[in-house]
Amino acid sequence: MYAVVDVETTGGKFNEEGITEIAIYRFDGNSIVDTFSSLVNPEREIQPFVERLTGINSKMLVNAPKFYEIAKRVLEITKDAVLVAHNAEFDYRIIRTEFDRLGYNFEAESLCTVDLAQKLIPDAPSYKLEKLVRSLGIPISDVHRAHGDAIATVELFRLLLEKDSDKEIISTHIKVLNRKTVSTKYLKIVDDLPTETGVYYLHGKNGEILYIGKSKNIKKRVLTHLTGNSKKAVKIQNSLHRVSFELCGTECVALLKEQHEIKKNQPKLNYALKFRHFAMGIRLDNKAPYHRLIIEQVRVELPYLAVFKNKKEAENCLHFWIKNYQLCSNQSSLSNSKTHCFRYDINECLGACKGNEKTENYNLRINQLVENLRYPFENMLIIDKGKRVDEKSFIYIKDGVFQGYGYFVLNHQIKTIEKVEKRLISIENNRDTEAVIRGYLRKERYKKLINLADA
């Protein structure tokens, strides 16, 4: 749990400042679960330059509560939460100073979105909150007021969590909360998990990621790990101390994210997906007079038209292609008949197996198949639902190559390629990602496609 905070102060000498406004959003990594915002009577003079910057003056604060009157609420909303702020050292110091004046020792772990942004968005033009969020297409209002800056920080932090594919933010969070022994009542672990689509992370005692998975129902899937009796389930039950998650909105984004983060983090219990998710492929051999389609185990050095989880899936696909493009089974790895193929007998093969069809005619249909396997546009966005009702997701293809995914609320946030790339969570393109996206496009479950040719 996070407490995203912003404070406005009187200005003045170090550790003599007072809070004039405070806003705190309790954030579980996906949604805001509690809010608190208030002007505060600092009982001291406000520096003139601060008045000009924030618009807050002493007259506005005459009837505002003093800090001791809101201190209990501040403690409630920040309890067991990691304090998140833009320039967290400042906000944390100011809050601690106010509590020190009351004789209370306020302590919390903190995360700074300036530091995180510098690491995860290294090419940002500026790391000042207003300029940074505007460059990312995040709306911000009431600049230099606590509530406006805090809600913008929430949206910035949400984006940073998405970009943090190494899971450093989550791991830090987990290490904080796992100082106490976790209960062995595993069902309690899933109480707060959502029933929505996303990626989940099973963590060990020290916050290390044991397993990464994706599901259309995170709670249900994690429950199977905790109640199963397979070797992997038993290992999970013996080591599990915490579950975290990230909602994705669509199963396609969840699968792309899962594959990417497994390969990057190498969790010890993700045996198969550490290396390759789609192990079988269909390759085109265009050296023979009649071009041949060959099913084989994927080799790194060779290109493939499509890749599959297993041989059966590959064979089913190849049968479909042969039927739809009137191809010859003998000119593929499906048949090794020394005579004509069985499709010739039912007039569905035009005679390549007997040498009756011209090679250029046959190969033209093969080339048409290859062309139809390409993405609909060289540069495009695949738009679908997001993690929230008011949000949409996008998958970005540039020059025919998958770049990554992202989320947006307002259309202007993806109006240009530059804006798309600023909101992008980058993922390496490989055969696995291509297979996922092609399957997604084939099923046509997305909302719409946007051709970026003119963007």
Image: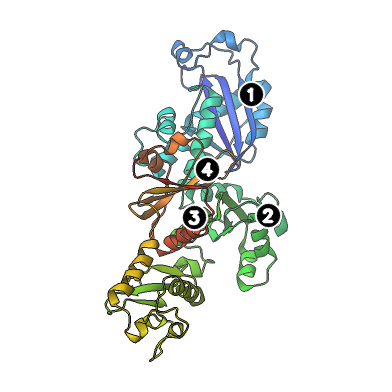
Query: What residue sits right under mark 2 in the picture?
Result: 189
Position of 303 with respect to 248 (left or right) is left
Q: Distance between the residues labelled 3 and 1?
A: 46 Å
Query: What residue sits right under mark 1 in the picture?
Result: 102
Q: Can residue 100 be seen in this view?
A: no
Residue 392 numbered mark, or none? 4
Position of 374 with respect to 443 (left or right) is left
Residue 422 point in image, percent of width and height: 39, 40
Choose mark 4 or mark 3, whichever is in front.
4
Circle 3 crowding by C-alpha within 10 Å: few under 14, some 14–19, many from 20: many
The quarter holding residue 294 reads bottom left
Q: How far apart are marks 2 and 1 (CA)?
A: 37 Å
Residue located at (54% from left, 40% from top): 391
Residue 98 point in image, percent of width and height: 58, 24
Circle 2 crowding by C-alpha within 10 Å: few under 14, some 14–19, many from 20: many
User: Which circle's residue, 3 or 1, is located before the other in the chain?
Assistant: 1
Query: What residue sits right under mark 3 in the picture?
Result: 257
Judged from the image, the secondary structure of the residue bearing numbered disc 1 is loop
Residue located at (66% from left, 52% from top): 195
Circle 1 crowding by C-alpha within 10 Å: few under 14, some 14–19, many from 20: few
Amino acid beneath label 1: Leu
Assess whether mark 3 and mark 2 are in contact (beta carbons under 8 angstroms).
no
Amino acid beneath label 2: Ile
Amino acid beneath label 3: Lys
The quarter holding residue 95 reads top right
Residue located at (55% from left, 12% from top): 44
Choose mark 1 or mark 4, whichever is in front.
4
